[in-house]
Image (cartoon, rainbow, N blue to C red):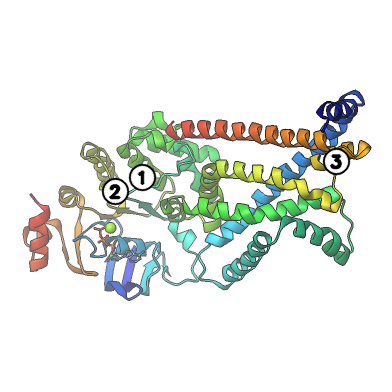
Amino acid sequence: MIKIKNLCKSFGDNQVLSNITETINQGDKVVVIGPSGSGKSTFLRCLNCMEDPTSGSIIFDGEDLADLRVDINKHRQNIGMVFQQFNLFNNKTVMENITLAPVHLKKMTPAEAKERGIELLQRVGLEDKADVYPSTLSGGQKQRVAIVRALAMNPKVMLFDEPTSALDPEMVGEVLDVMKQLANEGMTMVVVTHEMGFAREVGNRIFFMDEGQITEQGTPEEVFGNPQSPRLKDFLSKVIV
Amino acid sequence: MNFASKFDVFWELFIEQGGWKRVISVGLVNTLLIAVLGLLIGIVLGTLIGAVKVMPKYKLLPKILDKICTVYVGFFRGTPIVVQLLIGYYVLWPLLGITISPLNTSIIIFGLNSAAYVSEIMRGGILSIDPGQMEAGRALGLSYSTTMIKIVIPQAIKNILPTLGNEFIALIKDTSVVSFVAATDLYKTFTEIGNVRYEYFMPYLAMAVMYMVLVFIISCGIKAMERSLRKSDKN
Ligand SMILES: Nc1ncnc2c1ncn2[C@@H]1O[C@H](COP(=O)(O)OP(=O)(O)OP(=O)(O)O)[C@@H](O)[C@H]1O
Ligand SMILES: [Mg+2]
């Protein structure tokens, strides 16, 4: 689904990703873990070129997204992204947030988009919030709407960057539930998170990132049950209580 | 100084002979026309310039546009509005071989002038919007310009509305110089009343009061707008 080849990313002199080569397959639920500053967000953001890779390639749908000549907007329509800070459009209602892109990009008629929006909102239990503005929602509700907004484009893969890190603890569950549901439906997902319970339960592959590289990876059983490197052991001992 | 006789003269010309009608229907209307239409032109053009100013500048075209905008803003902020009016009316139009009425000249020049100021306000407004809004739009596959127009700029405009109100007040006050190109505004119509008896004491006093009332009313409008905006932020 996504083939990452020799991906490098530097901000000025600061090399954040070094030479990552990896394949994400259809239906994978990849969970990316690692210490703060190890490059998890940067890695995720390179996948849809929110950050342009310094070198290397990201092959998606047969095209190299790192190539500046490809129409990145077209490909991003198929790659949903969910942010830590939700980033709902403040000047749009919940329904407008959901329908804006599919309608503007001519993926759906306004009526179709609205119907799909209602259906998705029902799935996350927020159908009564369709006409309110984001500022009236709780963090957990905002994030569920943000997930719905991304899903409304019918993406082939969903990227999540610490979707529950900005939430009050009592709201983490409602967002993780939606993500689990999505995983069960077979969505291909790449999730950066500190929720190790979620990683174990939902992930089929765990990437451990350290200093800009994926230094260890495997099934949750392998990574959590039998970590190899001292760095991973050290990391796990700190996050798992 | 005989205040009573000055007042009598003014009363006779302004009230009894109906001088106020021209002051309102021509002077006040033109002053407002120049300020309102000038501000509208300023907002449209200023938004464009502000948007150019915040564009990422990797490519050549944004770089060139940015330079042009910098020169434009530098010119209009760096020269007196009177000079701009005179250059437009007596230099530029003849050079271009076109005739534009004093009133329209004033509207155009005030529009171009206010665009320079609005562009700076707009730039600040756009930069005050959380970059996450642009990111979310781009991540959905929307283009930079679509996200700018549909998401970022509407929020920026809402944030800068009070500042734009102040720009409007500044414009109203500045319009008092349009008689340099023979446009008829409040100042001009009051001067005409003074010219009848060469008695300017009361006309100019009345003019000052009128500008003050005008600005006071607009300030109240801005305050009311700020209050309702603050309320809608909480909704
Ligand atoms: N836009 C940027 N400009 C410059 N440096 C950046 C930028 N984004 C990230 N970095 C740097 O890249 C490094 C990796 O950042 P990144 O956000 O990818 O880490 P992370 O693993 O997601 O960390 P966290 O768990 O804290 O979110 C950090 O040193 C950071 O300072
Ligand atoms: Mg991060």
Q: Position of residue A173 (x, y in %)?
A: 22, 39
Tag 2 subunit? A
Amino acid on which the number 1 mark rests in the picture:
Ile
Residue behind mark 2:
A163
Residue closer to the observer: A25 or A134: A134
- Judged from the image, the secondary structure of the residue bearing numbered disc 1 is helix
Residue A147 is labelled as: 1
Determine the CA span between mark 2 and mark 3: 68 Å
Q: Position of residue B132 (x, y in %)?
A: 41, 52
Q: Earlier in the sequence, mark 1 or mark 2?
A: 1
Residue A81 is labelled as: none
- The residue lying at 89 percent from left, 64 percent from top is B97
Residue B191 is labelled as: 3
Residue closer to the observer: A185 or A3: A3
Determine the CA span between mark 1 and mark 3: 66 Å
Tag 3 subunit? B
Q: Position of residue A25 (x, y in %)?
A: 29, 61
Both marks 1 and 3 on one chain? no
Q: Residues within 10 Å of mark 2 (few under 14, many from 20)?
A: many
| Quadrant including the N terminus of chain A | bottom left
Both marks 2 and 3 on one chain? no
Asked if disc 1 and disc 2 are in contact, CB closer than 8 Å, the reply is yes
Amino acid on which the number 2 mark rests in the picture:
Pro
- Judged from the image, the secondary structure of the residue bearing numbered disc 3 is helix
Amino acid on which the number 3 mark rests in the picture:
Thr
Residue closer to the observer: A39 or A128: A39
Relative to B100, A12 lies left or right:
left
Q: Nearer the viewer, mark 1 or mark 2?
A: 2
